[in-house]
Amino acid sequence: MKSERDRINEKAESESKFIKNLTERMASVIVGQRYLIERLLVGLFGNGHLLVESVPGLAKTLSIKTLSDCIKTDFQRIQFTPDLLPADLIGTLIYNPKESAFTTKKGPIFSNIILADEINRAPAKVQSALLEAMQERQVTIGETTFKLSDPFLVMATQNPIEQEGTYPLPEAQLDRFMMKIRIDYLSPEEELDVVSRMAHTSAAASAQPVCGPADVIRVRQLVDEVFIDDKLKKYIIDLIFATRFPDKYGVPGLKNLIELGASPRASINLIIASKAYAFLQGRGYVIPEDIRAIGTDVLRHRVIPSYEAEAEEKTSEDIVNEIFGKVRIP
């Protein structure tokens, strides 16, 4: 008689062809950036949002647009600017004098896949409007609340270099992102491939669909079934608590370097992201390597370094990596 774990593992293996087709279809349009593609799929199947930090020109827009094409969903790119208003994002009420009534004009947030480009250039009111959409999967226009489409994924971007005229994202909003990922320049070989494909005046070809929204929702249900042992759940809790009380978890040297540790939402997101990552590897169960592979992406924006850490030039990523190196793997 098959165990529950074996049954789930067979399901994951049977879906591996679908995942492989989706990944290969995206990679046929996007050169390199395997890390970005994989994290996009973790966010999609884990029902979470992504914050991407990189310099311009590294195919962020192309990646998220290609994902939308591959899963046959609506896509909207919203350029965040200092003069953007919440109504520009979620929509507004328009008065019709002939009928003496208001009608609702929905904004670009009513889409499946959203690219919030340079999110830190928008003022706090706009960021708050996006916050409700990300967390509650709904928006309120006037006195009416509208549910957003499913699937719903926000990929926000910010430039790590140019900070003039920006509004830093508050910790409460950063915590709404399942992952914060950083992408770097391509290798010389990958960039040569890029110019060979893209250095022409005609428009680039878009990716052909592989699946639809119903398939995404079905896979999410399978991700929920991915098995994670109680010992690994305890390992995740230990990692999170080590960001709050490092002296109790074998890293006393970090006590003065952490201003704020990870929230309970980090524990939830790390479990979900680990299960989605394991599923992408064709497994129906989580292993410690899955947690370590995805853990930095889940935690780097949730651990706030202290002034002392900044003086020592220690980043949140350095702190998280040290915690992963010290907390014992079950």
Image (cartoon, rainbow, N blue to C red):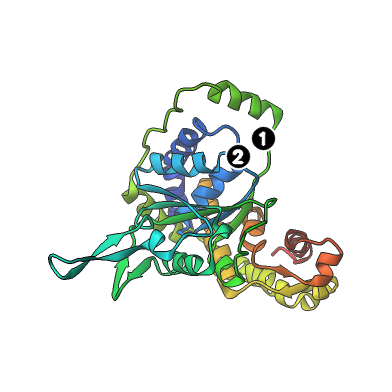
Mark-to-mark CA distance, 2 and 1: 8 Å
The one nearer the camera, 305 or 8, is: 305
* Residue drawn 35% across the image and 41% down it: 211
Q: What is the x, y in percent for residue 123?
A: 54, 65
Q: What is the x, y in percent for residue 3?
A: 46, 59
Residue 279 showing in the rendered view = no
Figure quadrant of residue 267:
bottom right
* Residue drawn 49% across the image and 69% down it: 125
Q: What is the x, y in percent for residue 146?
A: 30, 67
Q: Which residue is mark 2?
A: 58
- Numbered disc 2: secondary structure: loop
Q: Earlier in the sequence, mark 2 or mark 1?
A: 2
Q: Is residue 264 above or below residue 59?
A: below
Give the total of numbered labels: 2
Q: Is residue 45 above or below residue 85?
A: above
* Residue drawn 44% across the image and 55% down it: 153
* Residue drawn 31% across the image and 73% down it: 142
Front: mark 2 or 1? 2
Residue 261 showing in the rendered view = yes
- Numbered disc 1: secondary structure: loop
Q: Amino acid at mark 1?
A: Leu
How would you rate the neighbour count of disc 1 (Cα within 10 Å): few for under 14, some for 14-19, many for 20 or more?
Answer: some
Q: Is residue 36 above or below residue 246?
A: above
Q: Amino acid at mark 2?
A: Leu
In the picture as drawn, the residue positioned furthest to the front comes out as 97
**Viewport quadrant of the C terminus:** bottom right
Q: Which residue is mark 1?
A: 186
User: Pointer 2 and pointer 1: residues touching (CB < 8 Å)?
Assistant: yes
Q: What is the x, y in percent for residue 102?
A: 21, 68
